[in-house]
Amino acid sequence: MSDFINNNWSVFITVTTLLGMVGCLVLLYVTGRKKVVARADNTTGHVWDGDLREMNNPLPLWWVGLFVLTIVFSAIYLALYPGLGSNPGILDWTSRGALKKDMATAAAEEAPLYAKFASMPVESVAKEPQALAIGERLFMNNCSQCHGSDARGSKGFPNLTDHDWLYGGSPEQIKATITNGRNGVMPPMAAALGGDEGVKNVAHYVLSLSGSQHDATRAAAGQAQFVVCAACHGPDGKGNPAIGSANLTDNVWLHGAGEKAIMAMIQNGKNNVMPAWNEKFSPEQIHVLTAYVWGLSNK
């Protein structure tokens, strides 16, 4: 089936479309030429619902003309626009090309406005009502699906309104995150910690770092094993913004709090991806969006 679609699908669509149009013309011609022997009362003899009789009248000329005109219009349309398989049509029109043209037109119209904000530092842009309105629209249309319409995030998606930043919350760091995206990887650590007991001990040590409820005996045992985690989270568990490792001492839990959630993270690891937006947004748009996001936690 896949070979048929890959190699012959365009031909199949083209042939089917043309045969359908020709078939309509043939059907119209045949039915117009066919003579039905009528009765004296000009009916065909078909009766239904007791007293409804089919009359032997020809199709109105206006209906036949409209039918033919529809087929002619279809032929002209298919010659000009894509519709016959992979044939692009005489005008070489595509929806992607039309979108790019519209986006280029919109970008040209918006350029002076964005140029005004591009020359300003992020902190100043974050105080401009017009810039914030633009940034909010950009955020709602592109970022709210993950971070929420209020930017407070949810499990697995960071809250952008507080001061807890995996990769740093300065304007430069936020802009780098939006521009290039992020790929945060927490590897599974169960094997390195000696199995379930080691995982549980380290989980309780992690809980102790933030003052959360924990088993002191297990936390003491887990402290020595935490050395394998310190490479990313640091010996004090405060994380490292350079690689996006979480601060384990602030009681902010992106993927869930408590023994069960922390053990699952240690055992299974996690791969969180923030997509890059540099191909969709211009540098000027990213500058305004950065100001909006930065302003969420810097009122």
Image (cartoon, rainbow, N blue to C red):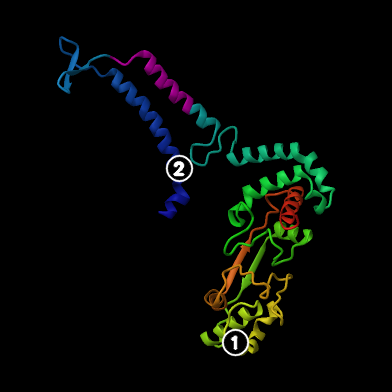
Could you classify mark 1 by the number of other residues whose Cα lies within 10 Å: few (under 14), some (14-19), or many (20 or more)? some
Label 2: which residue? 11
Q: Residue at x 33, y 21 (%)?
A: 29
Could you classify mark 2 by the number of other residues whose Cα lies within 10 Å: few (under 14), some (14-19), or many (20 or more)? some
- The total number of labels drawn is 2
| 103 vs 239, nearest the viewer | 239
Whole-percent x, y for residue 192 in the image: 59, 85
Secondary structure beneath label 1:
helix
| Residue, far top | 40
The magenta stretch spans which residues?
58-74
Q: The C terminus appears in which quarter of the rendering?
A: bottom right
* Disc 1 residue type (three-letter): Ala
Left or right of 188? Residue 134 is right
Whole-percent x, y for residue 175 in the image: 75, 57
Q: Earlier in the sequence, mark 1 or mark 2?
A: 2
Distance in Å between CA atoms under marks 1 and 2 = 72 Å
Residue 91 picture quarter = top right
In the image, residue 67 lies in the stretch drawn in magenta: yes
Residue 33 drawn above or below residue 3: above
Label 1: which residue? 216
Residue 289 drawn above or below residue 73: below
Secondary structure beneath label 2:
helix
Residue 83 drawn above or below residue 145: above
On the question of residue 191 being in view, the answer is no
* Disc 2 residue type (three-letter): Val
In the image, residue 99 lies in the stretch drawn in magenta: no
Task: Point out the frontmost of discs 1 and 2.
Answer: 1
Whole-percent x, y for residue 281 in the image: 70, 49
Specify the label residue 76 is tagged with.
none
Whole-percent x, y for residue 191 in the image: 55, 84
Q: Residue at x 69, y 81 (%)?
A: 231
On the question of residue 160 being in view, the answer is yes
